[in-house]
Amino acid sequence: MYGYFGTTIIQSLLLFAGIITAGELTGFWMESALGFISLALGISVWRRNQMYRWLEKRPGQPMTQVPGLWLDMTRRIQKREAELSAERDATHRLLANLHQSLASLDAGLVHLTNEWRINWWNKPATQLLGLREAFDKDASVFNLVRTPELFDYVEAQQFELPITLPSPITSGTMLEYTVCSIEHTGYLMVVRDVTRFTRLERMRSDFIANVSHELKTPLTVITGYLETILDNQLVSDGGVRAVEQAFKQADRMNSLIKDLLMLSQLETTEPDSDPQKIRIQDLVENAIQDAQEVKKAVNKVDTQISTGVIPRISVLGDWNELSSALTNLTGNAVRYSHDGADIEIDFKMRGDDGVLTIRDNGPGIPPEHLPRITERFYRVDNSHSRETGGTGLGLAIVKHILYRHGGTLEVTSKVAQGSEFRMVFPADRIES
Ligand code: ADP
């Protein structure tokens, strides 16, 4: 009622008044003081015992309603307990809602410890991965998804892109795993059933491959006839230009079909499991030779192609794919730069990675186009690209080839200053 300090003052005054009154009445000051102090101590011990017993009881039980210091303290404890209990209830409700929301997601969520042990999962994860509470809690995730790809993916710690693997429990089902690291507590793995998307993607690739293949034969026949007409001068002067145009377009279509087939082959086949050792020097020499042809074809005979000092280093991969990638980038540098431009091919180590750079002092690429230039058929300047014989698939092919070699394509460019395309190979692909 009077609070902690009020009660303390009142109790002290009462004690003091008791001692004074008893001392005055009896004349025994010392005995009165000792008597009253002992009485106060006794009451204090009694109340303390009461409080101790109360603390041992279940929370919420009332304390004996005797006013004083201890009652005030118990009230404060009770108030704090009630607050904590309300906070706990709110947290429980929040957790229950969260669990319910996570269970209603169509993606499986698995929380993994820092040691990749399964700690918690939601209901969809039970269905997608066949997790069982009694067996799989604390088990290693690699015991559940027994594929070396997942282990390699996790070991590389590069979680920007998801990984798609066959389901460990249902044949024919494809699951996509996305992992993100959670500070201090481990990892969160999101699992999605992507069987339908994989099938659609496969159908799309097959369709493009089939169409391209079917177009190849009639187009070869058409090109053949047009060539015969031109070679044997079977049309009068007025018709020559038309046939020449038809031949040029048929040739363009041939390149397009060739690139489409190459892209679809890159998408649908597994990378070579036994890669060859390819000398960087050989790749560069081959690209320079091909670039001479491009120079002639696009009338850029004054363009200079030089190389830096190429170290005696090899890259592990597929010759056809890597030479095609480098030829593509060198060809682009020739085609998009002015006649007389300087192109440089160079190889350097960057940490453990090997970087093959193709640099030109051509027109450069405006920054807003850079994020999209590796998309299929994306062109910075439509008309110019077609003029120079581009199919719009070159960089998409290069990107895919590098991806199959565990590498990446980096591009930096400045308008009116030039572009730099870098083929980056990881350490495990480089051999000195
Ligand atoms: P394309 O067959 O049209 O060359 P690519 O995929 O090879 O298609 O290139 C995409 C676009 O990127 C090109 O259309 C061109 O606008 C731009 N590009 C590529 N390389 C260069 C370069 N070295 N300099 C300037 N622009 C370039």
Image (cartoon, rainbow, N blue to C red):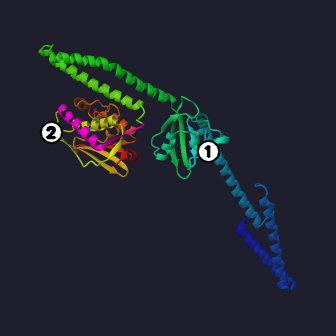
Residue at 83 percent across and 76 percent down: it is 38
Q: Can residue 110 be seen in this view?
A: no
Residue at 34 percent across and 22 percent down: it is 212
Helix, strand or loop under label 1: loop
Highlighted range, magenta: 273-297
Q: In which quarter of the image is ligand 1?
A: top left
How many labels were placed on the picture?
Answer: 2
Check disc 1 and report the residue beneath it.
139
Q: Using residue 177 as the reference point, say whether residue 399 is left or right of it.
A: left
Does 52 appear in magenta?
Answer: no
In depth, the one of 292 and 332 nearer the eye is: 292
Residue farthest to the right, as pictured: 26
Residue 302's disc is 2
In depth, the one of 69 and 292 nearer the eye is: 292
Q: Is residue 350 placed above or below 174 in the rendered structure?
A: below
Query: Crowding at label 2, few (<14), some or many (≥20) Cα neighbours within 10 Å?
Result: few
- Residue 172 figure quarter: top right
Q: Position of residue 291 (x, y in %)?
A: 22, 36
Q: Distance between the residues labelled 1 and 2?
A: 66 Å
What amino acid does circle 1 point to?
Ala
- Residue 168 figure quarter: top right
Instruction: Return the disc, 1 or 2, that comes first in the chain's sequence.
Output: 1
Q: Is residue 26 placed above or below 363 in the rendered structure?
A: below
Residue at 16 percent across and 38 percent down: it is 339
Answer yes or no: disc 2 within 8 Å of ligand 1.
Answer: no
Q: Position of residue 324 (x, y in %)?
A: 30, 35
